[in-house]
Image (cartoon, helix red, strand yellow):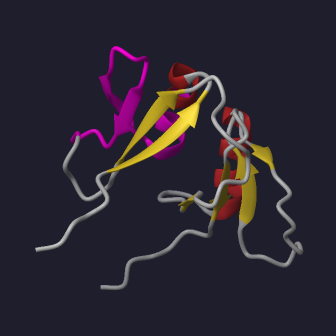
Amino acid sequence: MACRISELVLECREPEALARFWCEVLDFVVVGRESDGSVEVGPREGFGGAQPTLILSPSADPGPVGARLHFDVNPTDRDQDAELERLLALGARPADIGQTGEEPWHVLADPEGNVFCLLKARIKEL
């Protein structure tokens, strides 16, 4: 038997605002709220499926931007350029982490500055 990643925890200043952002980006819904102000977002099916949930945990000092862990996202129903426009409209912004400009992905930051990458759409091989 093995383990699987079930949740990813992201410390942030405004969990509700970040929950709205990531729900829109990933087509997730709020699946839970805790008394400490944490908000858990995940797939519409809820916890326990193939995708991990995100727990947005309140912190007055969420740590340095540019942490060692970041999200990669792939468009599921549009091309990369159209998804980039959508993410920017939701409040993402371009981020410079030293990329050359030749990369096939876009480096972005969410509304609190957490870096993530927008990759090209990936088609499942049958």
Task: Indicate whether residue 4 is drawn in magenta.
Answer: no
- Where residue 22 appears, as percent x and y from the top left, is 52, 38
Q: Residue furthest bottom?
A: 126
- Where residue 38 appears, as percent x and y from the top left, is 42, 24
The image quarter containing residue 80 is: bottom right
- Where residue 39 appears, as percent x and y from the top left, is 41, 26
Quadrant containing the C terminus is: bottom left
**In percent of the image, x 62 and y 63: which residue is there?**
79
With respect to residue 77, does 17 lie above or below? Answer: above
Quadrant containing the N terminus is: bottom left
Query: Residue 8 vs residue 1: left or right?
Result: right
The image quarter containing residue 64 is: top right
With respect to residue 5, does 48 lie above or below? Answer: above
Observer-nearest residue: 1 or 20? 1
Observer-nearest residue: 120 or 30? 30
With respect to residue 104, does 52 lie above or below? Answer: above
* Range of magenta residues: 20-46
**In percent of the image, x 56 and y 29: which residue is there?**
18
The image quarter containing residue 33 is: top left
Observer-nearest residue: 43 or 111? 111
Observer-nearest residue: 75 or 22? 22
**In percent of the image, x 28 and y 39: which residue is there?**
44
**In percent of the image, x 51 and y 36: which residue is there?**
24
Q: Residue furthest left?
A: 1
